[in-house]
Amino acid sequence: MIIDNNSVGNLIRIIQPDVIAVYGIAEGMQVTSVIVPAFVRDFEGVVEKSFVGLPVTEEYMTEDKKLTARFEGVNTTENGQNVRIINAVIINGNKHLL
């Protein structure tokens, strides 16, 4: 999944059931709408600074330590442009291939 504004929404839809399972509906919706986009923006910066073609992994945890999110991705090129990609996200051990 290419990291852009659309991908954040798609990623939220994919992992939201995992987050809601941890926090319940109301708090889970808040976590997915506020914290997950922050994780993605940070990971985008990590990928952007990485060497092209090398896999990158970064792990994030919520402040209360109830949720761990590990992102896997790669910085690649397409038509001469750098493209940042998320290949997978693992939420509390549940892996989602993207």
Image (cartoon, rainbow, N blue to C red):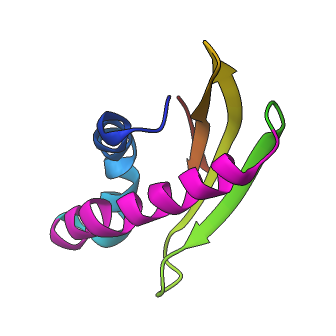
Q: Is residue 94 above or below residue 81?
A: below
The picture quadrant where one finds residue 7 is: top left
Name the spot of residue 55 as percent of width and height, x first: 80, 39
Residue at left offset 65%, top offset 48%: 48
Q: Tell me if 81 is positioned left or right of 5 in this view.
A: right
Name the spot of residue 3 as percent of width and height, x first: 47, 38
Q: Is residue 52 above or below residue 8?
A: above
Q: Residue furthest toward the top?
A: 79
Query: The magenta stretch spans which residues?
Result: 26-51
* 67 magenta-colored: no
Label total for image: 0
Q: Tell me which secondary structure the magenta stretch mostly adopts.
A: helix
Residue at left offset 46%, top offset 58%: 41
Q: Residue furthest toward the front?
A: 80
The picture quadrant where one finds residue 80 is: top right
Q: Residue furthest toward the left?
A: 26
Q: Is residue 92 visible?
A: no
Residue at left offset 76%, top offset 47%: 56
* 44 magenta-colored: yes
Q: Tell me if 16 is positioned left or right of 26 in this view.
A: right
Q: Is residue 52 visible?
A: yes
Name the spot of residue 69 as percent of width and height, x first: 56, 60
Q: Tell me if 25 is positioned left or right of 49 in this view.
A: left
Residue at left offset 79%, top offset 34%: 52
Q: Tell me if 72 is positioned left or right of 10 in this view.
A: right
